Amino acid sequence: MASAILASLFHPSEVLALVQYKLAPKTKYDYSNDKSRERLYHHLNMTSRSFAAVIQDLDEELKDAICIFYLVLRGLDTIEDDMTLDLDIKLPYLKTFNEIIYKKGWTFTKNGPNEKDRQLLVEFDVVIDAFLKLKPAYQTIIADITKRMGDGMAHYATAGICVNTIADYDEYCHYVAGLVGLGLSDMFSACGFESPMVAKRKDLSNSMGLFLQKTNITRDYLEDLRDKRFFWPKEIWGQYAESMEDLVKPENKEKALQCLSHMVHNAMKHMKDVLEYLNMIKNPSCFKFCAIPQVMAIATLKMLHNNYMIFTHENIKIRKGETVWLMKECTSIDAVAAIFRIYAREINNKSNPLDPHFIDIGIACGEIEQVAESLYPGSTAEVARLKAGVLAGTSGTVLTAAAVVAGAVVLKNKYA
Ligand code: D9A
């Protein structure tokens, strides 16, 4: 907590959000009356602490279905990601995972020891038991998406197949993330929480996945390179280097940053669709569930832009204070549109005028402002409120004082 406050010291809104988050009573989710359900949510919390809480805040009707969907996809992902598994082992599992989820008692122990979610597959019978208890409508949606994703993953895992063109890049991201957007939209409409239009707009649902996946792929350049996974399309990096590995050579720094801008600009193309999708979502718990990952992604994209650390450090993240502030503020489409406008402006401000993508990125940022101003006029006031943040009025001064005192205390303890 102290290090989080220190990192956010010059962002009073984040310090306030951190203090409020720390003091806020944590929602206790009690599953003690159902041991298998308790084990299921244990695995959800193990896979992603922060997002697990957002899933558990979903209305009862969808909570278990989306928890199980999330764990089935994390299971499939863990087999796809495992570079210690031979292809003749991996491919059949990827292509039949949609049948495996109906096999009571099935577990998988062939993962390498370092796979983060290995235990999930060792105890996958827990997920299958819960899956088999779901309403057939949700089972069908999960099995359909798992089949299409497994086949897509198997195609791109096949020897000699790689992400060459930007079309390949969009297709790969569709298989591993776009399809998740489509499946969730089918669930939102199937349970009646959202209009049938949400399931119909496959293009917008797909963009919800592509914006997240492309941000992750751009962020994880070095980690993936280390594991011999190449997701940046050759049609992009090929304009800046002879090989993906060449981008990390110090003499290629300028070219590497230009390539990074190209990847950032490509991801930004999905932002308008993301806003249009979120504008369709009316159920408050579904809205937060859908909005939180998207605002985290735009904040990550801003952190990535023109940031050479992508090529020197693995696993770079946005500040804890920033994530808590974003989760607190993304409560309405106007607030989310405002957050997109604020980060688009900061991305534009970070651009290097000598970068060949300076203008394109500027245009993309301008388009976000135009779309937000015209379709979500309430976002203008939200931008003012968020930017004024806590500095406005008395609370501002009080908090700045508190932040400085807190900072001093932290420093004193650290260096006493
Ligand atoms: C999602 Cl059911 C994901 N992915 C995410 C998480 O958000 C999306 C995997 C399974 C499910 C959902 C997501 C959330 C809400 C609406 C969505 C949606 O579409 C309408 O998916 C498109 O990242 C993984 C994919 C991107 C491959 C889809 C958010 C999440 N964040 C992690 C952080 C991280 O970087 O993994 O899991 C976390 O907060 O721990």
Image: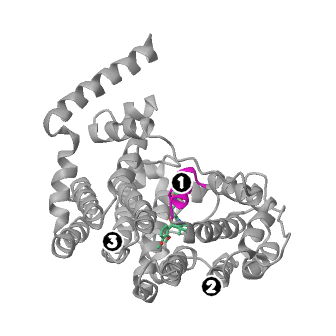
Viewer-proximal residue among 88 and 226: 88
Q: Are marks 2 and 1 in contact (CB under 8 Å)?
A: no
In the orientation shown, which residue stands out farthest toward the front? 33
Check disc 3: other Cα within 10 Å, few if <14, some if 14-19, many if 20+. many
Please give the residue where the numbered disc 1 appears in the rendered image.
53
Disc 1 marks which amino acid?
Ala
In the rendered image, residue 279, in percent from the top left (x then y), is placed at 32, 74
Left or right: 294, with 393 as reference point = right
Real-space Cα separation, disc 3 to disc 2, in angstroms: 30 Å
Disc 2 marks which amino acid?
Ala
Helix, strand or loop status at disc 2 = helix
**Residue depth check, mark 3 versus mark 1: number of the one nearer the observer:** 1
Q: Are marks 3 and 2 in contact (CB under 8 Å)?
A: no
Left or right: 195, with 373 as reference point = right
Which region shows up in magenta?
A: 48-58
In the rendered image, residue 197, in percent from the top left (x then y), is placed at 40, 87
Q: Would residue 350 be seen by someone viewing this image from the given angle?
A: yes
Residue at 44%, 28% (x, y): give it.
2
Q: Classify residue 20 by image quadrant.
A: top left
In the rendered image, residue 283, in percent from the top left (x then y), is placed at 41, 71
**Residue depth check, mark 3 versus mark 2: number of the one nearer the observer:** 2
Disc 3 marks which amino acid?
Met
- Please tell me the numbered disc located at residue 271: 3
> What's the coloring here?
one colour
Q: Which of the marked residues, 3 or 1, is nearer the chain's N terminus? A: 1
Q: Judge whether residue 50 is colored magenta.
A: yes
Real-space Cα separation, disc 2 to disc 1, in angstroms: 25 Å
In the rendered image, residue 57, in percent from the top left (x then y), is placed at 51, 59
Residue at 58%, 69% (x, y): give it.
66
Q: Judge whether residue 143 is colored magenta.
A: no
- Disc 2 under 8 Å from ligand 1? The reply is no
